[in-house]
Image (cartoon, grey):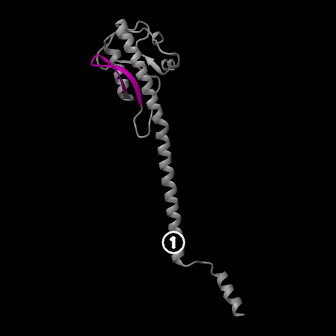
C-alpha cells in the first residue's frame, strides 16, 4: 500500500525542482535570443547584398556612358542631341534606357560649368542605412566624371541648372 501512496504523491505533485525550471527558462531565453539575433543579422546582410550589385552595375553603366559621351564630345566639340547617336555596342545599348539625358534636342556645348549634370539614373537607388541616391555623369573641372549623389543634392543641382543655364 505504501508503494501506491508514493506513486500517487508523484502524480499529484508534477512540479520540478526550482533550479531545473530556472535552467530550462534560461535555455529557452538564450535560444530565442540567438534565433532573433541571427534572423536580424541575416535580413540586414541579404538586404545589403541585394542592393550592392545594383550600385556597382549602375556605376559600371555610368562609366561606359561617360567614356562614349566624352569621346563624342572631344570629336564633335559638343554634347550629342540625343543619347541614341552614341556609338555603343549592341550589348551595351541597355544603358540608354537606364539614364536620363539632360540636354535632349539640340545637345549642349562641349564644356559646361562645374556641377552640371549631363545624364543621371532614371530611378532612385536605396541601400540599407544610406540615403536614397542617384548615379550621375556630370562636369567637374572641365571633365566628365561619374558621381553618386544623394537625392537632395541631386534635386538641388537640377534646380540650379534650370535657373542658371540656358536650355540648348
Q: Dot 1 corresponds to which residue? A: 23
Q: Height in image: 16 above or below 86?
A: below
Q: Quadrant of residue 62?
A: top left
Image x and y of residue 116, in percent: 33, 18
Question: Along the line of sight, which residue is nearer the eye, 39 or 16?
Answer: 39
Q: Is residue 138 magenta?
A: yes
Image x and y of residue 9, in percent: 65, 85
Image x and y of residue 81, in percent: 43, 8
* Extreme residue in the left direction: 141
Image x and y of residue 23, in percent: 51, 71
58 relative position to 156: left or right: right
Residue segment shown in magenta: 133-147
Q: Residue at x 37, y 6 (%)?
A: 76
- Kindly report the secondary structure that dominates the magenta region of the rendered protein: strand
The N terminus - image quarter: bottom right
Q: Residue at x 44, y 31 (%)?
A: 55
Amino acid at each position: 500500500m505504501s508503494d501506491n501512496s508514493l506513486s500517487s504523491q508523484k502524480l499529484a505533485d508534477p512540479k520540478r525542482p526550482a533550479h531545473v525550471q530556472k535552467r530550462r527558462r534560461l535555455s529557452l531565453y538564450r535560444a530565442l535570443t540567438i534565433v532573433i539575433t541571427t534572423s536580424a543579422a541575416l535580413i540586414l546582410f541579404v538586404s545589403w547584398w541585394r542592393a550592392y550589385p545594383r550600385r556597382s552595375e549602375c556605376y559600371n553603366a555610368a562609366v561606359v556612358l561617360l567614356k562614349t559621351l566624352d569621346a563624342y564630345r572631344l570629336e564633335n566639340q559638343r554634347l550629342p542631341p540625343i543619347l541614341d547617336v552614341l556609338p555603343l555596342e549592341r550589348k551595351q545599348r541597355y544603358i540608354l534606357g537606364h539614364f536620363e539625358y539632360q540636354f535632349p534636342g539640340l545637345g549642349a556645348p562641349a564644356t559646361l560649368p562645374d556641377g552640371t549634370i549631363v545624364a543621371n539614373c532614371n530611378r532612385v537607388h536605396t541601400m540599407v542605412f544610406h540615403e536614397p541616391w542617384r548615379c550621375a555623369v556630370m562636369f567637374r573641372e572641365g571633365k566628365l566624371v561619374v558621381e553618386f549623389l544623394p537625392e537632395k543634392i541631386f534635386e538641388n543641382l537640377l534646380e540650379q541648372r534650370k535657373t542658371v543655364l540656358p536650355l540648348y
